[in-house]
């Protein structure tokens, strides 16, 4: 295929990696629309995502979500956006739930064939990595692609992943540190459930932590002296499990105990993450740090990472437009744009890859 040579490149991005059905339209790195249909209420009563329910809901929602993406893009761009404008369709192929991924891939294949559009398969974590370059529909926010210097450090913190990534260029990634067990976002949700905040409770725990004493409980910082950049959150989670078990032998947790456990957990979880970022910055000079994933919604997480990077004089970039922290189609479209610039299109029959590794992205 010939490379797209236009000043303005329009991408439709689709993500069905877990329990959000999302479609977005971007013009270069400007997000014209980013529609997210969440299934969280359907899965809450089961205490986690049920794959068959997720698949069914993706199938029911994906077409109206895509239609709404066009409607919203038209409103924000102030002229009608149609299929004639779309240069390529970008879609998540992994990682994620296998049967959920297939829904997005199938729809993207169908649309690419029906409208004769270029097809771009995107690694979900690469979407999180570059969510910090996204601008709003008016072109505000984000960092200019042309101004990014390499190597950069990627910090990916979500419900399923905790990774430090050496970024040598667009599409050139190497994982230099990762969790050996639970992801940080997963630990937030599990601890939240233990202390009665429900599922998914990570966001609620973050709010509770603002009101608690972060030094009330002296949990150990996992892998503090390992000397490498790998992390672990299962031990911290287990320590809280036994603390809660002991405290609830007779009475339920008090409100103060819930607040203090939340704050103490968050302090230690963030401290471990920042220690590993510090090791990375000590070992090599990085020009930028790009942080992505749902855990970046925490103000404290952002503050402490910024503080760590500031010690090394490194600029830190976070997702800074609405709803782009979480799983969404806009970040997939952004990567689609970066790939279109480099003439990197995919075989339309590419298979889903539930365990896709960002370091194998090309």
Image (spheres, rainbow, N blue to C red):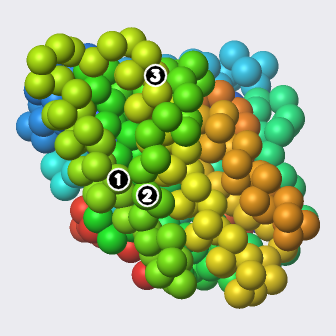
Question: Distance of mark 3 from mark 2, alpha carbons?
Answer: 18 Å
Whether residue 152 is visible here, answered yes or no, is yes
- Badge 3 or badge 2: first in the primary sequence: 2
Q: Which residue is mark 2?
A: 220
- Badge 2 or badge 1: first in the primary sequence: 2
Q: Which residue lies at the image location 39% right of the left edge and 40% below the top edge?
A: 188
Residue 256 or residue 226, whichever sits in front: 256
x, y percentage for residue 288? Answer: 80, 67
Above or below: residue 297 compared with residue 172: above
Left or right of residue 47: residue 314: right
Decide: marks 2, 1 in contact (CB < 8 A)? yes
Left or right of residue 242: residue 84: right
x, y percentage for residue 287? Answer: 84, 73
x, y percentage for residue 236? Answer: 34, 53
x, y percentage for residue 183? Answer: 37, 56
Residue 96 or residue 242, whichever sits in front: 242
Question: Callout 2: helix, strand or loop?
Answer: loop
Question: Callout 1: helix, strand or loop?
Answer: helix
Above or below: residue 248 compared with residue 15: above
Q: Which residue lies at the image location 85% right of the left edge and 70% below the top edge?
A: 312
Above or below: residue 258 compared with residue 236: above
| Circle number at residue 236 | 1
The crowding category of the residue bearing disc 2, from other C-alpha atoms within 10 Å (few below 14, some 14 to 19, many at least 20), is some
Left or right of residue 258: residue 84: right
Whether residue 10 is visible here, answered yes or no, is no
Question: Distance of mark 2 from mark 1, alpha carbons?
Answer: 7 Å
Left or right of residue 119: residue 281: right
Q: Quadrant of residue 78?
A: top right
Q: Which residue lies at the image location 16% right of the left edge and 49% below the top edge?
A: 99
- Badge 1 or badge 3: first in the primary sequence: 1
Q: Which residue is mark 3?
A: 259
The crowding category of the residue bearing disc 1, from other C-alpha atoms within 10 Å (few below 14, some 14 to 19, many at least 20), is some
């Amino acid at each position: 295929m010939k490379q797209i040579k236009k000043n303005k490149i329009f991408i439709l991005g689709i993500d069905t990696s877990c329990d959000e059905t999302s479609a977005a339209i971007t013009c270069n790195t400007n997000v014209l629309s980013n529609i997210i249909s969440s299934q969280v209420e359907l899965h809450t009563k089961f205490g986690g995502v049920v794959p068959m329910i997720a698949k069914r809901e993706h199938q029911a929602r994906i077409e109206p979500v895509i239609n709404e993406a066009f409607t919203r893009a038209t409103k924000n761009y102030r002229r009608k956006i149609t299929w004639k404008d779309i240069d390529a369709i970008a879609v998540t192929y992994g990682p994620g739930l296998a049967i959920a991924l297939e829904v997005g891939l199938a729809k993207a294949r169908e649309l690419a064939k029906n409208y004769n559009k270029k097809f771009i398969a995107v690694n979900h974590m690469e979407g999180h990595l570059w969510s910090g370059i996204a601008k709003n529909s008016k072109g505000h926010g984000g960092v200019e692609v042309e101004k990014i210097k390499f190597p950069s450090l990627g910090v990916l913190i979500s419900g399923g992943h905790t990774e430090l990534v050496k970024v040598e260029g667009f599409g050139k990634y190497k994982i230099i540190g990762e969790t050996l067990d639970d992801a940080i976002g997963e630990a937030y949700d599990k601890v939240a459930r233990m202390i009665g905040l429900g599922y998914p409770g990570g966001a609620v725990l973050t709010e509770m932590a603002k009101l608690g004493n972060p030094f009330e409980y002296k949990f150990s910082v996992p892998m503090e002296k390992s000397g490498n950049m790998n992390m672990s959150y299962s031990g911290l989670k287990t320590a809280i499990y036994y603390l809660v078990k002991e405290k609830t032998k007779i009475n339920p947790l008090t409100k103060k105990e819930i607040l203090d456990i939340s704050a103490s957990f968050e302090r230690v979880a963030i401290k471990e993450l920042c220690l590993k970022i510090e090791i990375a910055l000590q070992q090599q000079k990085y020009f930028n740090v790009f942080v992505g994933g749902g855990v970046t919604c925490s103000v404290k997480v952002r503050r402490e990472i910024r503080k760590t990077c500031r010690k090394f004089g490194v600029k830190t970039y976070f997702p800074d437009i609405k709803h782009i922290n979480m799983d969404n189609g806009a970040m997939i479209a952004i990567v689609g744009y970066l790939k279109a610039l480099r003439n990197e299109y995919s075989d339309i029959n590419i298979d889903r890859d539930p365990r896709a590794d960002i370091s194998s992205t090309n």
